[in-house]
């Protein structure tokens, strides 16, 4: 049985990425490992005037919600008869995805593209491009849905 690594960031494309991965896993008899990479610099919140404890409390609340959301996706796949596991890891996004792919010996990485323009991608880079350029495993990119104007949903 093969393993699909499915990194998710809870953006607008996440539901579609999980849906595509579920169909692929069902067709191939694959396991699904959902991965969320938490920011390695969790103290990097600026602009809060209420002090460090408020920042720590906010970060902790956000991490708990992301953890719960990741497990909800895994549970949903389980109700579809798929073997799914949630992995919540702190680190630099591209490097962590590639490390986890190696760790679980993923045969395919399924991830979303936000559909940002070429200029932004050239200046800031993108996770999907980083995974494709620096990794050695096959990657399936699920594009963001397009509305009637051609803009990302």
Image: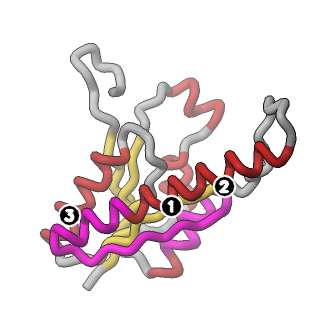
Q: Which residue is mark 2?
A: 60
Residue at x-position 43% and y-position 60%: 70
Residue at x-position 34% and y-position 20%: 151
Left or right? Give the position of 64 relative to 148. right
Q: Total of numbered circles in the picture?
A: 3
Point out residue 26 in the picture as x, y percentages from the top left corner.
16, 70
Of the numbered discs 1 and 3, the one sitting upstream in the chain is 3
Front residue of 67 and 21 = 67
Point out residue 104 in the picture as x, y percentages from the top left corner.
46, 81
Residue at x-position 76% and y-position 52%: 41
Left or right? Give the position of 123 relative to 35. right
Counting other residues with Cα less than 10 Å from the Cα at mark 2, is it few (<14), some (14-19), or many (20 or more)? Answer: few
Of the numbered discs 1 and 2, the one sitting upstream in the chain is 2
Question: Which contiguous range is marked in magenta?
Answer: 72-101
Front residue of 27 and 84 = 84
The kind of secondary structure element at disc 2 is helix
Q: Nearer the viewer, mark 3 or mark 2?
A: 2
Marks 1/2: CA–CA distance: 10 Å
Q: Is residue 138 visible?
A: no
Q: Which residue is mark 1?
A: 67
Q: Which residue is mark 3?
A: 24
């Amino acid at each position: 049985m093969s393993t699909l690594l499915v990194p998710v960031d809870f953006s607008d494309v996440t539901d579609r990425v999980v849906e595509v991965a579920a169909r692929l896993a069902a067709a191939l008899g694959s396991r699904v490992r959902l991965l969320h990479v938490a920011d390695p610099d969790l103290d990097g919140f600026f602009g809060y005037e209420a002090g460090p404890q408020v920042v720590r409390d906010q970060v902790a609340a956000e991490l708990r919600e992301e953890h719960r959301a990741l497990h909800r996706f895994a549970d949903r796949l389980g109700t579809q008869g798929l073997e799914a596991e949630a992995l919540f890891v702190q680190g630099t996004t591209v490097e962590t995805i590639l490390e986890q792919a190696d760790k679980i010996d993923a045969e395919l990485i399924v991830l979303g593209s936000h559909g940002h323009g070429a200029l932004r991608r050239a200046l800031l880079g993108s996770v999907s491009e980083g995974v494709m350029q620096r990794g050695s495993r096959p990657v399936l990119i699920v594009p963001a849905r397009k509305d009637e104007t051609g803009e990302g949903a």
